Image: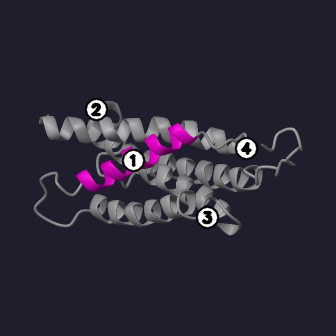
C-alpha cells in the first residue's frame, strides 16, 4: 500500500469514526462542534483524495465521491454560513447523515474486496451477503437520519437578565 493510499484510508476511517460521534450527538440533540469540524474536514478530504488514487477509468467510487462532495458542500453551508437557522438545521442533519452513509457504503465495498472471508462470500459483490450488508447499512442510516432530524432541535433562546448584561 502506498503512503498516499494509507493517508486516504486513515482519512476515511477518521471520517467514519468522527461521523458516528457527530451522528450520535445529533441523536442526543447536541452539536459537538469540534467533532463536526473533524468529520466534515476528513470526509471532504477522503472524497477529494479518492480522485488522486490511480484509476484507468471512471469508477463507481468516483461517482459516490462526487455525490459526497455535493452533499458535504450543503452540510457545510447549512452548518457554518447559515448557522443551522430554520430549515438549514434539518438540511445539515440529513446531509451529514448522508455523507457518513456514503463513506460507510464505500467502506463496506472495500471490506468485501479486501477481507478474504467477505470476498469469499461475495466475490463479485452481486451475491446476497453483499446486497444484504448494504441494505442493512442503508436502512440503518435512513432510520438514524429520520430520528436525528427530529431530535436535533433549535437551542432554546436564553433571556438576558439585567445582571448578565453589562
Q: Label 1, label 2: how many angstroms apart (C-alpha)?
A: 31 Å
> Where is residue 119 drawn, in percent x and y?
31, 39
Q: Residue at x 60, y 43 (%)?
A: 23
Name the secondary structure under disc 2.
Answer: helix
The label shown at residue 9 is none
Q: Which residues are magenta?
A: 33-49
Crowd band around label 3 with a 10 angstrom C-alpha radius: few (<14), some (14–19), many (20+):
many
Q: Answer yes or no: do the residues labelled 3 and 4 have beta carbons within 8 Å?
A: no
In the rendered image, the vertical position of residue 33 relative to residue 92, given as above or below:
above
Q: Nearer the viewer, residue 124 or 158?
A: 158
Q: Label 3, label 1: how many angstroms apart (C-alpha)?
A: 18 Å
Earlier-in-chain disc, 2 versus 4:
4
Q: Residue at x 61, y 59 (%)?
A: 83
The label shown at residue 41 is 1
Q: Label 3, label 4: how many angstroms apart (C-alpha)?
A: 15 Å
The label shown at residue 116 is 2
Earlier-in-chain disc, 3 versus 2:
3
Q: Residue at x 77, y 43 (%)?
A: 166
Q: Label 4, label 1: how many angstroms apart (C-alpha)?
A: 21 Å
Crowd band around label 1 with a 10 angstrom C-alpha radius: few (<14), some (14–19), many (20+):
some
Q: Answer yes or no: do the residues labelled 2 and 4 have beta carbons within 8 Å?
A: no
Crowd band around label 4 with a 10 angstrom C-alpha radius: few (<14), some (14–19), many (20+):
some
Name the secondary structure under disc 3.
Answer: helix
Q: Is residue 112 magenta?
A: no
> Where is residue 5 drawn, in percent x and y?
19, 40
Amino acid at each position: 500500500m502506498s503512503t498516499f493510499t494509507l493517508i486516504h484510508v486513515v482519512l476515511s476511517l477518521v471520517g467514519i469514526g468522527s461521523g458516528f460521534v457527530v451522528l450520535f450527538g445529533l441523536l442526543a440533540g447536541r452539536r459537538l462542534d469540534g467533532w463536526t469540524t473533524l468529520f466534515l474536514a476528513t470526509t471532504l478530504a477522503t472524497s477529494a483524495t479518492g480522485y488522486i488514487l490511480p484509476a484507468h477509468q471512471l469508477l463507481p467510487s468516483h461517482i459516490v465521491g462526487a455525490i459526497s462532495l455535493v452533499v458535504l458542500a450543503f452540510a457545510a453551508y447549512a452548518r457554518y454560513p447559515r448557522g443551522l437557522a430554520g430549515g438549514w438545521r434539518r438540511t445539515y442533519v440529513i446531509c451529514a447523515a448522508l455523507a457518513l452513509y456514503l463513506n460507510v457504503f464505500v467502506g463496506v465495498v472495500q471490506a468485501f474486496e479486501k477481507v478474504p472471508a467477505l470476498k469469499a462470500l461475495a466475490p463479485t459483490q452481486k451475491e446476497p451477503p453483499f446486497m444484504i450488508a448494504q441494505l442493512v447499512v442503508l436502512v440503518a442510516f435512513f432510520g438514524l437520519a429520520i430520528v436525528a432530524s427530529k431530535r436535533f432541535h433549535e437551542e432554546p433562546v436564553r433571556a438576558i437578565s439585567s445582571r448578565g448584561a453589562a
